[in-house]
Amino acid sequence: MTTGKKVLITGGAGFIGSHTVDALLETGYAVTVYDNLCPQVHGPGCEQPAYLDPSVEFIKGDVCDRDSLKKAIAGKDIVIHDAAEVGVGQSMYAIDRYIKTNVQGTGILWDILVNEKHRVERVLVASSMSLYGEGMYLCPDHGPFFPFSRPAQQLEAGQWAMGCTYCGQKAVSLPTSENKPLHCQSVYAQSKKDQEEYSLLLGKAYQIPTVACRYFNCYGPRQSLNNPYTGAAAIFSSCIKSDQPPMIYEDGRQKRDFIHVRDLVRAKLLLMEHADAPYRVFNVGTGKPNSILKLARTLIRLFDKDLEPSILHKFRAGDIRDCYADISTIQELGFEPRISLEEGLRDLVAWGQEQESSNRVENAHRELLDKGLVV
């Protein structure tokens, strides 16, 4: 058991952060949580989520508040930087908010680490699979390729499958490795790319061991069922609980890599402690693709509802077709995902059955329509 090390988690009251808190406490770390308790995630007037372990030191504060963040960092050995605005669609119109929190907040964190006295010996930054844009693909005739995006004319015609950049024929998706060129398709993705690159650049320059974790599509208990901009599993759960069919863009066959939060947190702690992790980037996923439509239908079955997903046959700006992880790099350090999608969704549903939720998905969809972000 590790003892004596003090960890600060920015965004530690959130979905992934709070599970990270639990795992750190079980391993013997002392934990401080720094979180602004964003009303979109936690609801209005929240002072501290009931699920947050009462033994942690909790500081309500914003990552853009330099003085408050500086005090939180004092005396800490490790910083896990999870604080971020999350949501591809919303980021395309709440631009200032996303850049301020994700980019400026990260800049303030590093300005403190570079210019103030501290004892931080490792930084773990939460990056995202979204900065890849489209994943890797294979054309039968031209081999592997890395598309930027699908042509607008193709999307307007309702042709969703990725075609070869060179000949146009239908391509097959491949696992996406960390060395794939980055093609951000949303403000959220670009902000996460900036977070990652500033952190690795400054960590290396000032010899503060830093690790970037590119999270794939994480789901599980504590994921807000009231936030229509969170992950697909929680958004669908909110709809299904209120007896509304989950809305799916395109044809539902787009592929993602869904990883349960407990598996993701195990990966985080491995990367936080492993001697070979610093100054590197790691995919954190399962390596197994599943379609959005399968996710929705599985949740409908597990909630025991008589519903059918509403497939919109429309494209949302910032979305991609397929992206799932090549996890061979983190496997070399000893990580293997343990929780299947079926098992993980059962866990989410069991938790979700006990939660109050407000289905705000239709409002979010109308906001995108009003902004001209749905084709």
Image (spheres, rainbow, N blue to C red):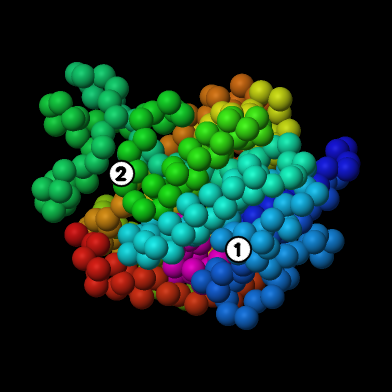
Vertical position of residue 47 compared to residue 235: above or below: below
Label ID, residue 268: none
Q: Residue at x 13, y 53 (%)?
A: 156
Could you classify mark 1 by the number of other residues whose Cα lies within 10 Å: few (under 14), some (14-19), or many (20 or more)?
few
For mark 2, give the secondary structure. loop
**What type is the residue that disc 2 sits on?**
Arg
Q: Nearer the viewer, residue 232 or 44?
A: 44
Magenta stretch, residue numbers? 224-240
Residue 355 appears in which quarter of the rendering? bottom right
Q: Earlier in the sequence, mark 2 or mark 1?
A: 1
**What type is the residue that disc 1 sits on?**
Asp
Vertical position of residue 209 compared to residue 348: above or below: above
Q: CA distance from mark 2 to mark 1?
A: 37 Å
Q: Nearer the viewer, residue 82 or 73?
A: 73
Q: Nearer the viewer, residue 70 or 124?
A: 70
Where's residue 100, x and y in %? 46, 59
Where's residue 124, x and y in %? 63, 41
Query: Taking 298 as reference, is 142 left or right?
Result: left
Give the number of callouts.
2
Where's residue 147, x and y in %? 26, 33
Residue 232 magenta-highlighted: yes
Query: Taking 9 as reference, is 317 left or right?
Result: left
**Mark 2 and mark 1 residues within 8 Å of each other at the beta carbon:** no
Q: Residue furthest front?
A: 115
Label ID, residue 65: 1
Residue 110: tell me if it is visible: yes
Q: Which residue is mark 2?
A: 321
Query: Taking 276 as reference, is 188 left or right?
Result: left
